[in-house]
Image (tube, rainbow, N blue to C red):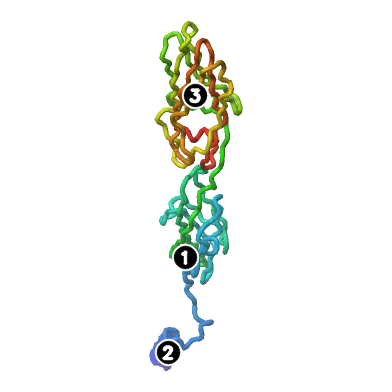
């Protein structure tokens, strides 16, 4: 009679021995991997996030061009598939990821009429798209970094325009203009011409019934300052149109060059029934570049 129970016990023991050997070999392999005895090419490498080694705006320049166009020069360690950059915002709020480049362009929008240099901070970050057949897509992000640069103001510009234009525009902004005369029968008035390089006419007409004439006092652009960053340079004038004898004019107050104060006071005198006309011609101001031109100088 055959002994089947003995064979069964032998096969169970053999299976247990083989299983034990397999466990031992796996454990030994794991130990060798952990100890570094298995060559790196045979180990499964966990991808690492990229690292930004260097980040410099415009290759490390201290100042940019006033136009605000920048280059974000960067060097990374590892792999990167995308980058993002933000202006003065370390959280990158609303900033989208773009295909990675070693020197992408970046544009900073600043007011064209700014009157001071502007220090800006650009934050920069990269990431790598890591995935495998069995894994879902995941991104490995670098730590963000930043650099700063100065964007200078646009160079000042010189503006020439008619005093008549300035008068009309300033009046629309609420600037005050006045003329007074010392006799009820005399006249004084201000007349502005609304065309390019148009003059501002200050007209005094003497008393038609008395030989002693009349005096007039004009106050223009009273008590006002030009907008910050704007300066008075010059104002041409022509007084040859005064007629008759005994006529005179005095420029009691005139803006100083490079001043922001633009108040003008003029005193004139005209004798019996004559006219003295002072003509202010061309303003010259210096100020920042502006889409409004010289009109931006008046509040």
The spot of residue 284 in percent (x, y) is 55, 36
Question: Counting residues from the N terminus, which is met first, the one under dot 2 or under dot 3?
Answer: 2
- Name the one closer to the observer, 208 or 266: 208
Question: Which residue sits at x=51%, y=83%?
Answer: 40
**CB contact under 8 Å: marks 1 and 2:** no
The spot of residue 204 in percent (x, y) is 50, 16
Q: Which mark is residue 140?
A: 1
Task: Give the quadrant of the C terminus.
Answer: top left
CA–CA distance in space, label 1 to label 3:
80 Å
Question: Which residue sits at x=51%, y=41%?
Answer: 287
Q: Which residue is mark 3?
A: 249
Task: Give the quadrant of the N terminus.
Answer: bottom left
Identify the image quadrant of residue 32.
Answer: bottom left
Query: Comparing marks 2 and 3, which lies closer to the viewer?
Result: 3
Viewed as shown, does residue 36 lie left or right of 99? left
- Name the one closer to the observer, 133 or 93: 93
> Label 1's element?
strand
Q: Which residue is mark 2?
A: 21
CA–CA distance in space, label 1 to label 2:
40 Å
Q: Point out the residue furthest to the top here.
A: 209
Query: Comparing marks 1 and 2, which lies closer to the viewer?
Result: 1
CA–CA distance in space, label 2 to label 3:
119 Å
Q: Which mark is residue 103?
A: none
Question: Which residue sits at x=46%, y=12%?
Answer: 212
> Label 3's element?
strand
């Amino acid at each position: 009679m055959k002994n089947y129970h003995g064979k069964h016990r032998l096969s169970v023991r053999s299976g247990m021995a083989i299983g034990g050997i397999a466990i031992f070999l796996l454990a030994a392999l794991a130990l060798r991997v952990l100890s570094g005895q298995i060559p790196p090419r045979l180990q499964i490498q966990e991808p690492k996030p990229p690292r930004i080694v260097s980040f410099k705006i415009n290759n490390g320049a201290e100042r940019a061009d006033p136009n605000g166009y920048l280059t974000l020069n960067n060097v990374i360690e590892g792999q990167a598939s995308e980058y993002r950059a933000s202006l003065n915002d370390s959280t990158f709020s609303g900033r989208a990821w773009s295909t990675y480049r070693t020197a992408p362009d970046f544009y900073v929008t600043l007011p064209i009429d700014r009157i001071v240099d502007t220090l800006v901070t650009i934050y920069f970050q990269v990431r790598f798209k890591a995935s495998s057949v069995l894994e879902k897509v995941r991104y490995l992000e670098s730590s963000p970094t930043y650099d700063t640069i100065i964007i200078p103001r646009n160079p000042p510009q010189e503006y020439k325009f008619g005093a008549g234009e300035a008068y009309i525009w300033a009046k629309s902004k609420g600037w005050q203009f006045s003329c007074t005369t010392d006799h009820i029968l005399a006249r004084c008035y201000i007349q502005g011409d609304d065309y390019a390089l148009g003059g501002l006419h200050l007209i005094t007409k003497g008393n038609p019934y008395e030989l002693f004439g009349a005096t007039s006092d004009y106050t223009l652009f009273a008590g006002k300052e030009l907008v910050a960053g704007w300066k008075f340079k010059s104002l041409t004038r022509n007084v040859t149109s005064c007629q008759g004898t005994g006529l005179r004019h005095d420029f009691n107050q005139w803006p100083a060059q490079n001043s922001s104060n633009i108040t003008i006071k003029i005193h004139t005198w005209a004798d019996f029934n004559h006219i003295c006309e002072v003509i202010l011609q061309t303003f010259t101001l210096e100020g920042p570049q502006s889409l409004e031109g010289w009109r931006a100088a008046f509040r």
